Amino acid sequence: MATALSTQPQDHQQSPPPSPPLKVDLEGQTKQAPEQEVEVVDFSKRAQWLRAAVLGANDGLLSTASLMMGVGAVRKDPKTMVITGVAGLIGGACSMAIGELVSVYSQYDIEVAQIKREDRNGALGAEEIDARKEKLPSPWQAAGASALAFAVGALVPLLAAAFVKEYKVRLVVVIAAVSMALIGFGWLSAVLGKVPAAKSASRVLVGGWLAMGITFGLTKLIGSAGV
């Protein structure tokens, strides 16, 4: 009897109420889905473009400075030196643009021909063909970037010489400005190429000094010989 009384309350125990069903916020999920999309950026292509721009600016800097130093070896007036630099800037920028345009157009034609060969049997879809063509380099964009980079580099010696009338001071100012720019371009090229910065900058600097010195010396020698 005692056992029955002790077990009777257990038989009348109520089970806990069921937990409410989970509500799925489908609308919230659809709103958050676009925020989870991550845009993939090809940083290797950006590094290639930046490296090409640095090399183009270095070419403009060094070629224009050497040309100005060569003419400055036989003509001491600032007008002649500056006009020579302007001519070097225009001619060099046009040369860089045309060379880059021809080169990139050749690469573009080769890539397009390769895509057409692969799609000869209809293996590629229209969307895939368009996507692959969009990834190809733009010849006109490359030409404009090369010309702009060359002009930016050529402006350094031009601005350094434009406001100095004294001949020897002008030469020193041009050499100093070009040297600082060479160190900067050498350091930036080293960072992009992941090589020691000091070694790269010193190599670019010494090369620039040699180019300007040889141009100045040979032009001075030819001018003194009366040729």
Image (spheres, rainbow, N blue to C red):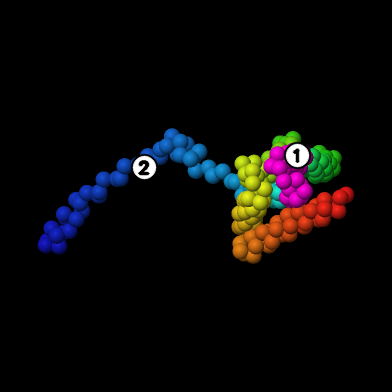
Q: Give the magenta part as a residue range.
A: 66-94
Q: Which residue occupies 15% across, 62% down?
A: 3
Of residue 20 and residue 40, the one placed in the foreground of this image is 40
Residue 83, can we see it?
yes
Would residue 2 be found to the left or right of residue 220 on screen? left
Q: Which residue occupies 64% across, 43% down?
A: 165
Q: Which residue occupies 76% across, 54% down?
A: 216
Of residue 40 and residue 176, the one placed in the foreground of this image is 176
Q: Residue 122: name its quadrant.
A: top right
**Direction left: furthest residue:** 2
Would residue 155 be found to the left or right of residue 121 on screen? left
Classify mark 2: helix, strand or loop: loop
> Residue 90 lies in magenta, yes or no?
yes
Residue 124 versus residue 225 in the image, above or below: above
User: Where residue 74 sits in the image (x, y, percent)?
Assistant: 77, 48
User: Amino acid type of disc 1?
Assistant: Ala
Q: Which mark is residue 188?
A: none
Q: Main secondary structure of the magenta part?
A: helix
Task: Name the residue beneath numbered marker 2.
Answer: 22
Distance from disc 2 to disc 1, alpha carbons, whole Å, reads 77 Å
Residue 52 versus residue 3 in the image, above or below: above
User: Amino acid type of disc 2?
Assistant: Leu
User: Where residue 102 sits in the image (x, y, percent)?
Assistant: 81, 41
Q: Which mark is residue 87?
A: 1
User: Which of pointers 2 and 1 lies earlier in the amino acid sequence?
Assistant: 2
Quadrant holding the N terminus: bottom left
